[in-house]
Amino acid sequence: MAKDYYKMFNSIEEYLKDKVEGIDNTILQAVEDRKNGRKFSFSEHIEGMILSLLSGQNEWKKIYQNKKYLGDLFFHYDKEKIKNCNPQIFIDGIYQKNIGTTSTKAQMHALKYNILIFERIETEYGSLDSFITHDTPIKIVKLLADNGSKYKLVQLGPPLVCEYLRNVGIDIIKPDRHIKRILASNKLNFISSQNDYEVIKKSKQLSDEIGISQVKIDYLLWNYCANGYGKICTKTNPKCKQCVIREFCNNPATKSNNKEADKKIIIVKKAVNSVKKDKKININKRTVNEQNSQIIQEIEQFLSSMPLNHEFSRKWFKTELSKQYKRSEDSYIPSDYCYNRTNNGIIYDKQPHYFLHIGRGKYRYVGKNYQYKGNIEHYPKNK
C-alpha cells in the first residue's frame, strides 16, 4: 500500500491514550482470550447477543456503564429464566435506566425466539462455539443475519450480528455508521460502497495487509469518531483541524492549512448556498442516483432485522428510518417499493420491491425475492 496505514492507526491510538478516558476494551480482550483457547458458554453467547441488541441506535457508553445492572436484570443470562419471563419486565427495566430505544420492545419480544435458535444450533453443532467457528466469520454473519437462513436471528442485521460475534471473541469489524463514514471515499477511501458485507470484506483485506486485527481497527476508528469518546470524525461538525490523520484523508477540510484547499472549500460552500437559494437549479443526475442508491441500502439494512410477513404502517416505517439514518421522512416512501403498487416517477421494472400494500397506509414485508403475479395498481406519488 502506498500510504503507511500502520502509522495511521498508531497515531489514532496515541491520540486516544492522551485525550480519551473510559474506553471499553472488552471486545479486544474477548478476541485475545479466544485466540488463547477460551471457550464461551451458552450464557455468555446470550449476553453477547443481548448487549448487541441494546447497542443498536444507542450510545454504547450508557450500556457499558450499566452492564452489572443488565446482568442482574437478565438473570445473569440464564436461558430458561429469560425464556419464561414476561418481556415487559425487561422492557421496563431497560427504560428505568434510560437506555431504551424505539426498538427495545421488539428486541425483548424477540429474545425467546433467538434463544430457541441458539438451542437449535447447539443441537446441530454440539455448541454455539463450534457453530461460530466452523466457517469464515462473514459466512457466519450471513447465516445469522440474512433473511431465508434457518438460523436468522430476529432484530439482528449484519452489524448487530457482527457485534454479537465480537462479544464472544470473533475477529470481525462491525459495519456501523461511524465505521462506514470514516472509511468512505470522501474520507479514508477504503470502501466504495456502504453495503455491510463490502465493508466487512475490505476491512479484512486491510487487516491482513497491515497486521492489525479487525477488532483493533474497529476499536480505534470507532473510538476516534464516536460521541462520548474521541469525537473527531463525527457526522456533524467534524474536528478536521484537530485530526491527527489528516494526511490520509480525502476531505478537503483536513487540508485547511493549504490555500488551494481553502479556495475549494469556499467554492463548495458557495455552491451549496446557491442550491439552497435557487431550487430550480438542475441537480446532477449522478448525485441523485447515488443518493437513491444510498437510501435503498439504508432500507435494506433496516429490513435485514424485520421478520417476513411483518405488517406495519407507512408512518412507522418513515419515522423509524428517519430516526436511524437522519434523513427526511419523505426519503422513505414504502409504496415506492411495493410489488402491487407503483407511483409517478418510479420505473417499476428497475425498482427493488419488498412490500405488499394491504390497505390504507398499511404494508406487509414479503422480501426481495417474493414471486408476485397479481395486478399492479398505479397511484399518484405523494398524493
Image (spheres, helix red, strand yellow):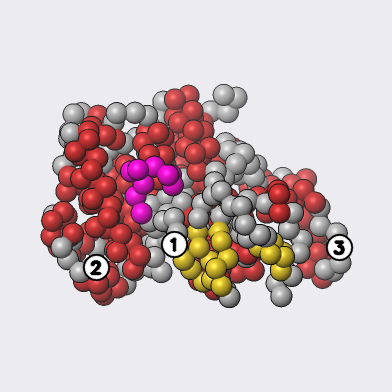
148 falls in the magenta region: yes
What secondary structure is the stretch in magenta mostly built from? loop
Between discs 2 and 3, the one toward the N terminus: 2
Q: Residues within 10 Å of mark 3 (few under 14, many from 20)?
A: few
Q: The magenta stretch spans which residues?
A: 146-154
Q: Secondary structure at mark 3?
A: loop
Looking at the image, which is closer to me, 208 or 301? 301
Q: Which residue is mark 2?
A: 87
252 falls in the magenta region: no
Q: How many marks?
A: 3
**Which kind of residue does numbered mark 2 sit on?**
Pro
Q: Residue at x 82, y 68 (%)?
A: 279
Q: Which residue is mark 3?
A: 281
Q: How far separated are the C-alphas under marks 3 and 1?
A: 41 Å
The image quarter containing residue 194 is top right
Q: Residue at x 36, y 36 (%)?
A: 140
On the question of residue 34 being in view, the answer is: no
Q: Residues within 10 Å of mark 1 (few under 14, many from 20)?
A: few
Task: Determine whether 167 is above or below 60 in the image.
Answer: above
Q: Which residue is mark 1?
A: 310
Looking at the image, which is closer to me, 373 or 180? 373
**Mark 3 or 1: the one toward you:** 1
